[in-house]
Image: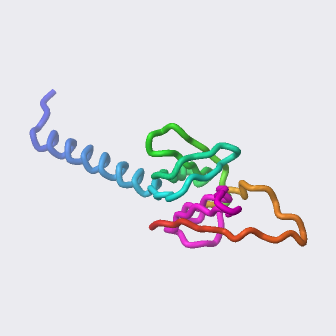
Amino acid sequence: MQIKFSTFVLASAALAVAALTSTSAMASTARTLKVPFSFTVQGKTLPAGEYVVTRNDLGTMVELQSKDYSHNFSWLAEATGTAADRVALRFDVDGQDHILRSIQFGRLESPQLTRKVKKGEDITPQLVLSGQ
């Protein structure tokens, strides 16, 4: 069996394009946001710093991970009608404390992570950190 040089070059080029395509697809499913304050997620206090927000390819989960991989949280997500390219962390603010309320990645949004507000209860202002 003979392998032509042109076939070898074309196959190599096709593999390179496939690798670049999958890399760019992965990059579009992860965004880094800088959180300038410590905050609480599911009862754990996380330090200020950079956090990576990701979504899976199926559009069913969002994830929050610290840049050093020491903290990782995942939630099932629901599709919303909001902006397709927006990535946002929403926080409830209680004095100096910040509690992660929800994560949005494009049209996906986590469930509300903080307790539900009772009828007639004063709603705590939200702080939203977003990136494109």
Left or right: 116 in relation to 23? right
Q: In the rendered view, tell whether residue 57 sits above or below residue 12.
A: below
Instruction: Please name whichever residue, 3 or 14, is drawn nearer the observer in this view of the structure.
Output: 14
Q: In the rendered view, tell whether residue 44 sits above or below residue 105.
A: above
Q: Is residue 125 magenta?
A: no
Q: Which residues are magenta?
A: 79-107
Classify the position of the N terminus by image quarter.
top left
Magenta-drawn stretch, dominant element (helix, strand or loop): strand
Q: What residue is drawn where x is 46% and y is 58%?
A: 34
Q: What residue is drawn where x is 61% and y is 50%?
A: 61
Q: What residue is drawn where x is 60% and y is 44%?
A: 73
**In the displayed image of the protein, which residue is found farthest to the right?**
119
Residue 91 falls in which quadrant of the image?
Answer: bottom right
Instruction: Please name whichever residue, 111 or 29, is drawn nearer the observer in this view of the structure.
Output: 111
Residue 111 falls in which quadrant of the image?
Answer: bottom right
Left or right: 13 in relation to 34? left
Residue 50 screen position, x and y as percent = 45, 52
Q: Is residue 102 magenta?
A: yes
Residue 26 screen position, x and y as percent = 41, 50
Left or right: 111 in relation to 7? right
Left or right: 66 in relation to 44? left
Residue 28 screen position, x and y as percent = 43, 57
Instruction: Please name whichever residue, 129 or 31, is drawn nearer the observer in this view of the structure.
Output: 129
Q: What residue is drawn where x is 52% and y is 68%?
A: 86
**In the displayed image of the protein, which residue is found farthest to the left?**
5
